[in-house]
Image (spheres, rainbow, N blue to C red):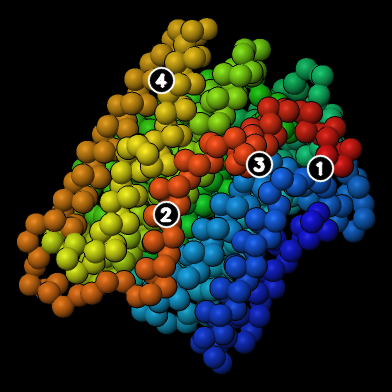
Amino acid sequence: MIQLLPLFVAIPLGAAFLTALAAFKARRLADVGSALATGALLVLAVITIGRQGVYPVGGFLAPLGITLVLDGFSVLLLLIVNGIGFLATLYSISYMERYTSKYKYFTLFLLMIGGMNGVVITGDVFNLFVFLEIASIASYALVAFGGEHEELEASFKYLVLGSVGSGFILLAIALVYGATGQLNMAGIAMALAGTDKHLLIAFASVLFLAGFSVKAALVPFHPWLPDAHPSAPAPISAMLSGVLIKALGVYALARIIFNVLGATPLFGMIVMGLGVLSMTVGVILAVGQWDFKRLLAYHSISQMGYVVLGIGLGMFILASGGDSVVAGTALLGGILHLANHAAFKSLLFFCAGSVEFRTGTRMLKELGGIQEKMPVTRLTCTVASLSIAGIPPLNGFWSKLIIVIATIQAAFTYPGLLVLTAVTVLVSFVTLVSFLKVLRYVFLGALPDAFRKIKESPFFMGVTIVSLALLCAGMGLLLVPAARGAILDPAIEALKQGLGYGSRVLAGM
């Protein structure tokens, strides 16, 4: 399997080139080729479950050569990126018929997938930046794909702020190289293991935090997201919220801090603070929104706060020498919510896209009563709404419950952390209220005369939303010992090993 690791980058980049080269002559080549490429990537991602190893590019071993690394954390992200990517491809087959130059869309889409996969599996910090830029530049163009004033303005704001974040990351990489003489992650980790942190490394950590927080849209680095996500085509909104902010933001931040530079208690507290701030600010701003997709965008900010809170709490406990079991519970909650959010938030954006596709509007006050015309969309949107609010037995409930349990356990040692429990529960309640409003205004009430002739989503769009609704209903099974041992526990252990990551990579895992 390790010999196939380069295919996670080669397949989407190659398919993007072939799509741009040939699909303008036959539009269906873009649909078929993109679906086959993303389907193959999903199959490869499933095959990686339970596997780990190091692939030396060109045969040069770490720390001298460029390596691709597969461990539990990267396996989880590969499943998320390529699973949602495949479903977004299916959804795009029908949805993107409303746009011209569909093959250009799929070319950019595949470049974005290839960039995200590269970020997940690379073992080199500079190549992480290169892949991050491939995915980011493709996403800037995809946000502007409609070509209207709103899309162009949102894309420009996203480009400017995203470039600032990329600049922070590149400067941090330069400082790390200056302090260690290494760009390979394993080499950096080995150079820093058992030594006092260099002042440049502390400064680089702050720059990495700022840069990746921009990519993850954490408050106060979030201003690009509420414009970019609503303006993009629905499948791109789903990819941005469901996948991109995780792969380029949370995953990269966690990997660099846990496994390359090393966590400190202060850094863990800062990350927790960003999580709590994002949770509360995001949900407060979401409550007053009447644009369906803009409301979902603010909830993305809020829900990423849950993920970062869980990871930050685990980081703080481990760096403080606390109970590793409690730290593992916190990391479990954060990582599981990362996976759950990919499912229910992608589903919500797909449902919003289906509603706009048929009605021509995403303003809640202009909708209503369409449940009789779009029963599948109504049912799947209800599942996603209850899941994001943390209603049992849907997937969002389990990850939020684990985060709450972790905060309570941590409060026995650090009593001040009990406030995190209250905030987590309160934000979940406000989220429920917000989505009850969505269901009320979109699907219930009297059907406007203008919508009397609308019908359910096209086949491929319907397949996508039903598939994700089933995932939302069944992902709680990831906590069953067999599934947890194969998927979640390896991801947690990959983070808990800290700077030991370096020695494991050098030993071939």
Marked residue nearer the N-terminal end (2 or 4): 4
Name the residue rendered at 77%, 45% in the picture: 52
* Callout 2: SS: helix
Marked residue nearer the N-terminal end (3 or 2): 2
Q: Which quarter of the rendering shows the C terminus?
A: top right
Is 152 situated above or below 484? below
Q: Nearer the viewer, residue 322 or 220?
A: 322
Disc assigned to residue 184: 1
The x, y position of residue 344, in whole percent, is 40, 49
Give the class, few, some or many, for how many residues have Cα within 10 Å of label 2's Cα (few <14, many ≥20): some
Residue bearing the label numbered 2: 470
Marked residue nearer the N-terminal end (1 or 4): 1
- Residue 255: quarter of image: top right
Marked residue nearer the N-terminal end (1 or 3): 1
Name the residue rendered at 18%, 58% in the picture: 443
The x, y position of residue 4, in whole percent, is 78, 60
Of badges 2 and 4, nearer the viewer stands 2
* Callout 3: SS: helix
Q: Is residue 392 left or right of residue 206?
A: left
Q: Is residue 313 left or right of residue 321?
A: left
Residue bearing the label numbered 4: 420
Is 483 situated above or below 503? below
The x, y position of residue 87, in whole percent, is 49, 64
Tell me the CA gap for discs 1 and 4: 36 Å
Disc assigned to residue 486: 3
* Callout 4: SS: helix
Tell me the CA gap for discs 3 and 2: 20 Å
